[in-house]
Structure formats: structure tokens, C-alpha cells
Amino acid sequence: MMRIWSIGLAALLAAACRPALAANPFDDLMEPVDGKSACFTRVYDAAHLKRNSRQKTTAMTVWLRYEAPPGSGASGPILSVSLAITQRGDPAAMYSDGGCSFDERANRNTSDQRLIKTYPKDAGMVCLQSAQPDVFDATSAEEGGDLILDRSKDRDTLMVYLDDSLIMVKRANRSKHLLIKFGPDDRVFLLRRAVNQDCDAIQEAVTTPEPGAPSRRR
């Protein structure tokens, strides 16, 4: 699954450089305007986890925001996504950060096979994750994996579809890559809109530079 991050990033930016304001189903979830952001969360209680004993995920938070593209070549804002997951037996959240673009055949590869088999459609908002947040002087050249976002029945719910694994990091050591594998019970999640403050921990984890590193606008 792992590919070279620089190649994937080039493909993502190429997609972002196409007209970005064309309507897609995701626009109802959040207006595609620079500076817009939204927070979605899900915390599973003990009763749910007891009924679903093979589910390792105990909580998930997604922070979405539209940002102006780097340089002047791209048209329209770019959607960035940050993901936080906690699992059974470990209270420390794991983080993933990346960028997204909408495509009518986003879930099909060059062999016409589904990229993420849990996602039942072809069109969608595919998010290419980096191996670590961009908070260091030197960043990883690896991709961190892929996920797909989709709106649910209304604008206050978000569907998250995970592949079989992601590279994630913990806040205490964001340079250490953790290969997190997801079983069948940890790949599809329904999250609900929350107040933006509920995403403060993610925002801090993926945007605060390491000591000595220059501050970046994300």
C-alpha cells in the first residue's frame, strides 16, 4: 500500500488545481471557502464496545478545513483533513494528516478495482495522508495511506472509510511512524458534527511546529 509520498502529493495537487468549486455532494457538508472548518467526533461507550468486542477503536475525531493552495497556480481552496483515533488499552490518541480531492472515480485504480473496498461507491472525497504532520524542518517522503470521506444522511454527519492500515503518530513523538492496522470492525465510522473546540487537540498536534522549526501556515 505504501507509495512514495512525493508522487502522491503531486497527483493530489494536480487534482486540486482543477476547478475546485464545481459542486459535489460534499459541498453540503461544508462550504468550499478558504478558512471554513468543521469538527466531527464519535466516542464509543462501554456498552457499545462490549457488544462489538472485535472493534478496537474507542473514539475518533476528524478536523476538516479549507485552505488557500500554495502558490498561485491552483484554483480554489484545498480541503485538508486531520484524523485522531484512540484504541482499547491506550488512552493516547494517534494522529494522521493529509489533503483531499473529490473525483467521480476516486475509488477506482488504473485496473478499475476499488481502492477501499468498504466504500460502496466510485465517486468520493479521497484523502491522501502523509506519514507525519508537516511540523518539522524535514518531513517524511512516505505516504501514510488513504481514506475516503462521505456525507451521511444530513449535513451534521460524516462517514469515514478506512483502508486496511494507516501510518499515524502520537503527539509525544510525531517523528515516530506507527503502522496501525485496521480489522474488519474498524474501517467504517459514522461521526457527528461537534463544536470546533472539540478539535483543538488535533489542531495543536498537526500544526504546532517542533522547537526550532519555522511556523507554517496550514
Image (tube, grey):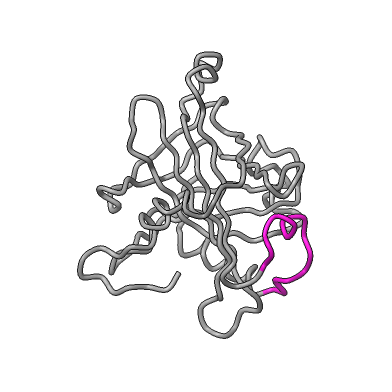
Is residue 28 one of those drawn in magenta? yes
Q: How many marks?
A: 0
Q: Of 38 and 186, which appears nearest the observer?
A: 38
Residue lying at 64% horizontally and 48% vertically, measured from the top left = 149
Q: Of 38 and 166, which appears nearest the observer?
A: 38
Above-or-below relation of 145 to 204: above
Q: Quadrant of residue 213?
A: bottom left
Of all residues shown, which one is farthest toward the left? 212
Q: Which residues are magenta?
A: 18-32
Above-or-below relation of 82 to 209: above
Q: Position of residue 98 (x, y in %)?
A: 50, 57
Is residue 217 one of those drawn in magenta? no
The chief SS type of the magenta part is loop
Q: Position of residue 1 (x, y in %)?
A: 50, 44
Residue lying at 58% horizontally and 56% vertically, measured from the top left = 38
Residue lying at 49% horizontally and 32% vertically, measured from the top left = 182
